[in-house]
Amino acid sequence: MVFEIPIYQVVLVRKGTLSSQMDIIYSSGDAAKLFKSYLHGVDREHFVGLYLDSANHPLGIHTISVGIVNSSLVHPREVFKIAFMINAVSVIVAHNHPSGDPTPSTADKQLTARLVQAATILGITFQDHLIITEQNGYASFAKRGLL
């Protein structure tokens, strides 16, 4: 009996670019500015990854999940898949709260714990998880001691 085994090729496609004045991310505030620009005007939750090299230069930004007004579905494999494809050393993730309240929910905290655990296993530095709002700034899990 002969079995046909599929042969795959992985292709990374650049969708566009995001203009920025920063070529190095020095702080959560720098990342928040990038994410706020990227997420400007969206009307539902978006979960996004910012992927960095060893000197904190952004290698790319990627929308991992688009949800509904107050939630989005995220799995660690989706967060880290692109990190491997672009040889990222570290990642900062963010999602927006269209409600305007940057307070992390219990689900946000649980997801972050899973992402930190996965990053550790995979050998990728998990720098921060940010919650972005249009009106009320952002919340940083690292600054709040939640990593």
Image: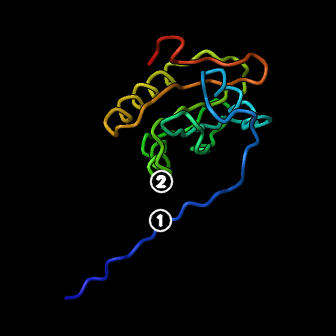
Work out whether 102 lies above or below 6.
above
Q: Position of residue 36 (x, y in %)?
A: 73, 30
Please report the residue visible at 60 percent of the width from the left and 37 percent of the height from the top. 47
Q: Quadrant of residue 41?
A: top right
Secondary element under disc 1, as helix, strand or loop, is loop
Q: Is residue 5 left or right of residue 90?
A: left
**Amino acid, disc 1:** Val
Residue furthest to the top in view is: 144
Q: Quadrant of residue 80?
A: top left
Please report the residue visible at 40 percent of the width from the left and 37 percent of the height from the top. 124
Answer few, some or many: residues within 10 Å of disc 1's Cα (few below 14, many 20 plus, some between 14 and 19): few
Please report the residue visible at 52 percent of the width from the left and 11 percent of the height from the top. 144
Q: Closer to the N terminus: mark 1 or mark 2? A: 1
Work out whether 108 lies above or below 59.
above
Q: Which residue is mark 2?
A: 85
Q: CA distance from mark 1 to mark 2?
A: 9 Å
Q: Is residue 98 left or right of residue 9?
A: right
Work out whether 102 lies above or below 129.
above
Q: Position of residue 33 (x, y in %)?
A: 71, 27
**For the residues bearing labels 1 and 2, Cβ distance under 8 angstroms:** yes
**Amino acid, disc 2:** Met
In what quadrant of the picture does the C terminus appear?
A: top left
Q: Which mark is residue 55?
A: none
In what quadrant of the picture does the N terminus appear?
A: bottom left
Q: Which residue is mark 1?
A: 10
Q: Is residue 20 left or right of residue 12?
A: right
Secondary element under disc 2, as helix, strand or loop, is helix
Please report the residue visible at 52 percent of the width from the left and 25 percent of the height from the top. 128
Q: Position of residue 129 (x, y in %)?
A: 54, 26
Work out whether 27 lies above or below 58.
above
Residue furthest to the left in view is: 1
Answer few, some or many: residues within 10 Å of disc 2's Cα (few below 14, many 20 plus, some between 14 and 19): few
